[in-house]
Amino acid sequence: MLARRLGAIAPLGGDERRAVEQLPARIQVFEPQQDIVHDREILTRCAVLQEGWAFRYKLLDGGRRQILSFHVPGDAPDLQSLHLRPMDHGLATLTRATVAFVPHESLHDLARRFPALATALWRNTLIDGAIYRAWIATLGQRSAYGRLAHLLCELHRRLEAAGLVAGQTCTFPITQGELGNALGLSNVHVNRVLQELRAHDLISLQGRKLSILSWSRLAKAAEFDPAYLHLTAPPEPRIGAG
Amino acid sequence: MLARRLGAIAPLGGDERRAVEQLPARIQVFEPQQDIVHDREILTRCAVLQEGWAFRYKLLDGGRRQILSFHVPGDAPDLQSLHLRPMDHGLATLTRATVAFVPHESLHDLARRFPALATALWRNTLIDGAIYRAWIATLGQRSAYGRLAHLLCELHRRLEAAGLVAGQTCTFPITQGELGNALGLSNVHVNRVLQELRAHDLISLQGRKLSILSWSRLAKAAEFDPAYLHLTAPPEPRIGAG
DNA sequence: CGAATACTTGAGTGGGGTCAACGCAAGTGG
DNA sequence: CCACTTGCGTTGACCCCACTCAAGTATTCG
């Protein structure tokens, strides 16, 4: 799974792919809403999401929670722990999830032996940074409507890159309350804005299934430019649907 | 300047420090509000701020601008361009500024010869990411009052780490409009909240000079925890002033 | 089938936006 | 040296997006 991700980030040679595939990994299954990594923890291994969704978050006074990012299979949501200690946020599962833990030591060794892999790992953390920048712009400048539209565009595109979109439909296990925690909105308002998006025939969202009904109009409402995701291989050329 | 920064991030040996100091650099002076790097540009060199302030930004429809980060002397605000192309945002000067441009090639060569420096560079980009996370939490969860307090805490702490604070006072060249662009607030509201902060005797801010009058109370209002800045060497143990 | 969780809807409120002046200081040119 | 300009800071009036509180309705799960 990690090999697949890194291969998407930078072309991998046979030796390199093999080395990634042979990394020692401890597999562990987590229940929903369970911490994979705690805030302030000092890690000695990295998590690679095999199955299920996860999210990073920060807790503030008064029980408020800001979700910092969502993660889908293939992501390595605490890769920064290789060089940044301790954790400045928590990492938890959204759904039941399967996680592979790879020792830091093995990753450092890998980076030493294969400079191209070191680059791919670094680049992976830089893409996280690019996504953070997009979220800052979203939170600072967009209306609730634009925020939701933008997040839906981003997640759909990332799921597509991970091969998890069929047609224009994907699983979407994020509750409205969690969307609010990510977008700085109340669950009540998220609900109302989702209804607007549905009323405009931009999306359909029910029972953990999301469909983009009109990609072009949704992207326009979101002012969405996928360049920041730095996806090297766009899966298929997108026909202007809608 | 870069050697000083990297030295603060990871301990440098003599050879390493010398290698950094001998990097080829082209010095250039920029006027205020001038682009150092344009959005979408593909870079072949990195900028290192020697003197003056800069900021990263994204432009949105309707002339709205989100400032993504502020940068002070010693920062390398486009280091991510080493492995992420093209730029997904712009980089501009806030004040007149002196910038040293270092070719990517030289930095790649440096990273190849000195793994510790490769780590320090990577770590530098990871700290940028940590700061983005803090901003996301600020924009998503804090009131205007808390946002301003948090940003002032962060900048003061970073300036202190750069040796640019005397007493509790530092230069502060950011206009109220720019603060608004960074915090997702209007310049009018920034003005009102700054007056509140002054009325509470937390800060003094006039004529491009900022003083923290009560660090402890300001940090409390901001819910500020400096851990995310990952400053290895806190300058002096802070006496609980205020 | 009962309990918990998520979603939905309505009413009322407030934080922060917009618009519009005005003050003030630093240039700048005649 | 002074009239003019320009950019930033300040203040007031009004308004709306999104929050809170509260109740009620699906869904999901044990």
Image: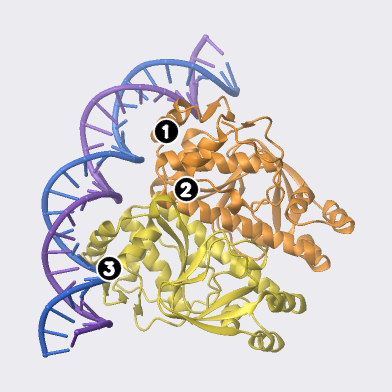
Chain colours: A orange, B yellow, C purple, D blue
Q: Report which residue position mark 2 lands on.
A: A66
Comparing A17 with A91, the one in front is: A17
Distance between mark 3 and mark 2 Cα atoms = 26 Å
Distance between mark 2 and mark 1 Cα atoms = 19 Å
Mark identifier at residue A193:
1
Quadrant for the C terminus of chain B in the image: bottom left
A112 horizontally vs A137: left or right? right
Q: Residue at x 68, y 51 (%)?
A: A76
Tag 3 subunit: B
Distance between mark 3 and mark 1 Cα atoms = 38 Å
Q: Report which residue position mark 3 lands on.
A: B202
Q: Residue A76, relative to residue B105: is it above or below?
A: above
Residue B213 screen position, x and y as percent: 28, 73
- Amino acid at dot 2: Gln
Mark identifier at residue B192:
none
Tag 2 subunit: A
Residue A222 visible from this viewpoint: yes
